[in-house]
Structure formats: structure tokens, C-alpha cells
Amino acid sequence: MSAAAKINAPETRIGRRFAKLKAEGRAGLVTFTTAGDPDYETSLAILNGIAKAGADVIEIGVPFSDPMADGPAVQASSLRAIKKGMTLRKTLEMVKSFRKQDDETPIVLMGYYNPIYIYGVDAFLKDAKKAGIDGLIVVDLPPEEEGELCLPALEAGINFIYLAAPTTTDARLPRVLAHASGFVYFVSITGITGTRTANAADVAGHVERIKRLSDLPIAVGFGIRTPEQAAGIAKIADAAVVGSALVDKVTKNLDAAGNPGPNTVSDVLALVSELAEGVRGTKRRAAS
Amino acid sequence: MSKLNTYRSGVDENGHFGIFGGRFVAETLMPLILEVEKAFEAARHDDEFWAEFHRLMKHYVGRPSPLYLAERLTKHFGGAKIYFKRDELNHTGAHKINNTIGQILIARRMGKQRIIAETGAGQHGVATATVCALFGMQCVVYMGETDVQRQSPNVFRMKLLGAEVRPVTAGTGTLKDAMNEALRDWVANVEDTYYLIGTVAGPHPYPVMVRDFQCVIGDEVRTQMQEAEGRLPDTLVAAIGGGSNAMGLFHPFLDDESVEIIGVEAAGHGLETGEHCASLTAGTPGVLHGNRTYLLQDKNGQIKDGYSISAGLDYPGIGPEHSWLHEIGRVKYVSVTDKEALDAFQLCTRMEGIIPALEPCHALAHVGKIAGGLSKDHLLVMNLCGRGDKDVFAVAEILGTKL
């Protein structure tokens, strides 16, 4: 039995959310913003409005000094947040505060392993569970390092979401999926976040490839920026992930001193609404 | 801890030295890392591969480098016999070329045509650009913008050799950011590109692979010391940034219990000032650039910049095998300040007629601290891993001389 089987999907927010999407016959929108960017209050305000604006699953980036899989937009947002004093501990507080008004929308933390390792894996999982975190995406923890956090997270009842890439061969895919839970995150391009745009036909082929081996929902991310692109992905996958385009809205609203302008929150949420419309206006193919 | 039968057995199947090392990389890179491992494993069991490696070591790099008895310094310190392993005499002026020759042969076996590398002081960048010119491959070197300014002669050398130097402004614009940027390039160009890492760090198999290529240093010392003194050395000393020259000297002697081994980190302005890059003596274990190792970081796990007068040492991490050797106590790690290294620089230049790079000056400064207290038949080997041509401008500035 896979360790992931310990987590009973209907009992998790992620499982319930994807079941609901399936029942509605549509794909979901997954949003990514960086915790504490450009400051704690603004970032919490974005978080508190984002589900209403149309996010079905919320990814929160945990700032790290050396985000080696991220493009310039997310790198800069990460550094801004760190400079303003954002930490993993405060990220958990932020989620706790969000959970007071939303107990339904799944929250997935995305980031790199070192801040979690330094926090302490056991303490982190305990605090993350308590804060209402549903899943983890840790970019630099491939299946080869599953003993570090993936298996303990499953034990603690938190989904560990694996990335699959275009470079993940058919021979390797079962290894990636062995302990995958929650959903599978397909990285649609070979590259870093926010830099290239995926070719929908290529993505469809990869999604098929994963579907043949797994019943988990598949979210597609990296390089999706516009409502049209999100709609294109919504036709072929269970969810579209948009990150850098939202982070760019934050960046654009910064004043010279690096403080958020008055339209930061509304601009981010407006784009989320447009993206959600793109995704929701798209009928899923019957088979998936 | 019970004593190990050997300290040289390498790593487990996932590339761990004890808890250190591993493969902490994004999924996009993972298949490629496994390919590199496969290519390296095939090469290391192939006599023809090693024959070509050693042919190039001899005729292109100029190996073996001499093991030189530094008589005046020996007399000056008044104790142990001090031998220099003269890796500064290598083509391109440092030990870095041992590794770039080895890896370019691996890249060629893998059919890769484009080579990327990170560089701090520019020594590894120059060594990479050199072998790319030799093998007719495209070369892109990532270098922190601060370092591009500080090391302009090496930037020009790389360009002369046909490499493209890309200044990195992301993050703090230093060596660690250059490494991040190289990893980002690799993720985006997995098909045709090989990442030629310059030190015994990064995801498995790099720490093992770079070590095995640098072991030519220690293997030679073993033979040369046998010829010179008819026995093993008593003490080995080498400077450590990422730790490749040190690992190359140390590794062949790890199982010789009688050999004392000392790695010297850069204490910069002093450990108490926080401005240093002594990852082992003042850092904590963490995960960065594909491996778990000792790092300079804050209490939240954010990586700090290293500082040293020597640009070749200011990496905030260290090779994972060093972390392991530190924890099991086989190698002793100490640190030396900028000022002590500068004093050693002048001493070596005046007394031996050798202008050393600032990196091995850290090792020499420590030698100066211990040599006098050792007996006259004590055999000490210090790795003089690079020459100081690249550093004369920086030293002139510090000494207040206008060139």
C-alpha cells in the first residue's frame, strides 16, 4: 500500500474541492502568491479575497533566499517578503488567520526545503496541520528524498504534491507517482516559473500520460499568464496554476520605496476574476 | 561513534555521506542528474577514459605538479618540514583544471555541446572556458555582478577563450546566485546542456565526481612523498571554500590513521564579526544547491552571503563530504582571518619567491601557527592550489599601493 493511501481524499479539503469541481464539470483555478509580498497585511488581504475572486485552490509561496526553480518575478517577490521580515512561522500565522473566515478552500504551501528543515520537520507538520494547511509542494524534494518530508507529511495527514515535468520519462513516472497525493502538479515547460509559455498540444500529451497511471487530479502550471491560456489548460487538465502573472501585479503597484500602492489588492484580485472566468467558461471534455 | 573500516567507501545509492549530500533538485533536473550519474559510473570503470584523462593531465595541464620542500619557510617556522604541493603551476594557474578536464570528457561522452558553469573569482570559469576551447564546445559562464567588477582580468580571459560571461544581478549578485542562475539555465536547456560544477558540492554525483578528478593531487603526493622521504606525510593542510582542492589532497589519505588532516576555512574579518565564510566552524546543516551540508544561514533558513578577502572562498556552503568528515571527526577544520592570510601572502612571496593565490594563503597561515610546535622530522604537506597573479590588484589596494 502506498503511504499516500493513508490520506482519505474525501476527508481532505483538496479531495473535496476536486470532487466538487468534477461535479460541476469544470476545471479549477489554482493561484500562487508569495506570503508577505509586498508586506504581511497586503498579502493577507489578497489571501482573504482570492477565493471569492475565483481561486479554487490557493498556493502560497514561502519566501526563500535562493529559489532556484523560479523566474525573476517570483525571485524578486521572495526577496521583498524576506526583507519585510516574512518567515515560515509568520506564513503559518497568516494561514491560521485566513482559516477563521474560510474553512473550505484548500491551502497549499509551495517553496523550498531549507526553511522547513530549519524549522524542524515534526514541529512544522504539527504547526502546519494546526494552521489549516492541506498540502505541500517542495520544489527541491524529488521522490529520491521522500523520507525527508513526504512520508512524514502523509503520516501527519497533509498531502504531499509531486511535480512531474516534461523530462520525467515514462520509466520514471511511476516513481514520481508512488507517494503522490492531493493532486499532481505538471510543470508544463522545461524552465523556470513565468518565463515561457507551454504548447497546449504538448501539455495534453503529458496529461494523458499521467492520467494513464494515476487517478489523481492534474494541475498544470509554469508559463500560464492569461485567461485565454488558463482556458486552454482547463480543457485538458483538472486545474490551471497561475503565479508569476499575479506576482507581476504586485510588482507593478509598488512605489519607489517598495511599498504597495492603493490598487495592489484590487489589481491582483481583478486578474484572478478574469482567470477564473476563463477557466469556468470552459467545458471539460467528457472523458476526464 | 564506532570506528569505520574505511572513510573512502563513497556514498550510498542516493548519494549520501552520512546525513549529508543527496539530490535535492527539482523534478525537471532529476532525470538529467541520473543521466550524469550513469555517464560518470560508466566512465570511471572505463580504462580508456582514465587513459585520456591522464594523457591530458600530463601533456596539457603539466602534471604531476612538483612536491617542493620549502626550505626557507621550514627554517623560518623552525619545526616541521614544509612541503608545498605545487598545483599553482598547472595550466590556468590552479587545481580547477583537473576537474574541468574530467567533466568535459563526461560531457562529450553524453553528447552535450553546450557547457555552463558558475564562477566566483573566475578561476573555475577560466578553467571551464579553457577546456571548452580545447574541445570546441559552446561555453556560458555565470558570474555574480560584484565579482565581474572585482575580477575583470579573469572576465577578459574567459572572453578571449570564447566564453560568454553572463553577469548575475539576481539575489545578491554573488557566487551562490551565479550557481542558482546556472541551475535555472540548466532547467531551461536540459536537452543540449551540461552543467560543469566547479567544486565538490551540488547534487549527487557531483561531489563524488569532482572529488575523484581532484584526487590526482593526493595520489601524486603519496608517490612523491614516498620518493622524497620513504614514508607517508604526517600532516596535510589545505584551504576550503567549496572544498575541492582539499578533498583532492585529503581523500587518498583518509584511511591512513597516522596522517593528521586539517582543512582551513576563511574567517574573513573574524568569526565574531559575522563577516566570514567558515561554513563548518560557524555554520549549521541545511539544504542548498542540491545537497545537505553545513551552510551560513539565519535562524529562519535563509542563506547568508559569505565574505572573504579571497573571492574563491566566499561560498556560503561547503562540499557535503567535508561536512561528514567534520562530524565524524576524521578531518579537523579551523579558520584563518583575512589579515592572517595577507601576512602569509607576503611571507611566502618574500621567502620562497612564490606569489600564491589568497586561497592557499589561508592554509599557509595555519601552517605558520602549528609548524613551530612540531618536531623537525614531522612531514607537513600544504596544497598550494593556485597562483596569485589574479590577486595582485586586490592585494595592492589593501596594502595601499597604487598600480
Image (cartoon, rainbow, N blue to C red):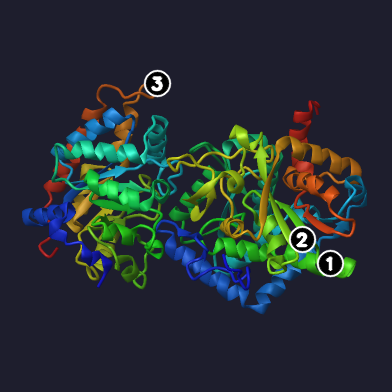
Vertical comparison of A225 with B112: above or below: above
Q: Single out the mark in the foreground, 1 or 3.
A: 1
Image-based side of B154 in relation to B41, left or right = right
Cα–Cα gap, marks 3 and 2 = 52 Å
**Circles 3 and 2: CB distance less than 8 Å?**
no
Label 1 sits on residue:
B224
Binning the other alpha carbons within 10 Å of mark 2 as few (below 14), some (14 to 19) or many (20 upward) gives many
Amino acid identity at mark 2? Val
Helix, strand or loop under label 1: helix
Q: Secondary structure at mark 2?
A: helix
Share a chain, discs 3 and 2?
no
Q: Is residue B21 above or below residue B141?
A: below
B345 to the left or right of A40: right
Dot label at residue B265: none
Q: Nearer the viewer, mark 2 or mark 1?
A: 1
Amino acid on which disc 1 is placed: Gln
Residue B21 x %, y %: 52, 59
Under mark 3, the amino acid is Ala
* Residue B212 picture location, percent across and down: 65, 66
**Quarter of the image that includes the N terminus of chain B:** bottom right
Q: Which residue is mark 2?
A: B61
Decide: is A210 above or below A233. below
Q: First in sequence: mark 2 or mark 1?
A: 2
Q: Residues within 10 Å of mark 3 (few under 14, many from 20)?
A: few
Q: Quadrant of residue A263?
A: top left
Give the residue at the far left of this rendering.
A23
The residue that appears at 41% across and 42% down in the rendered structure is A64
Is residue A229 visible in the rendered image? The answer is no
3D distance between C-alphas at marks 2 and 1: 18 Å
Disc number for residue A256: 3
Q: Position of residue A277 (x, y in %)?
A: 14, 42
**Which chain letter matches label 2?**
B
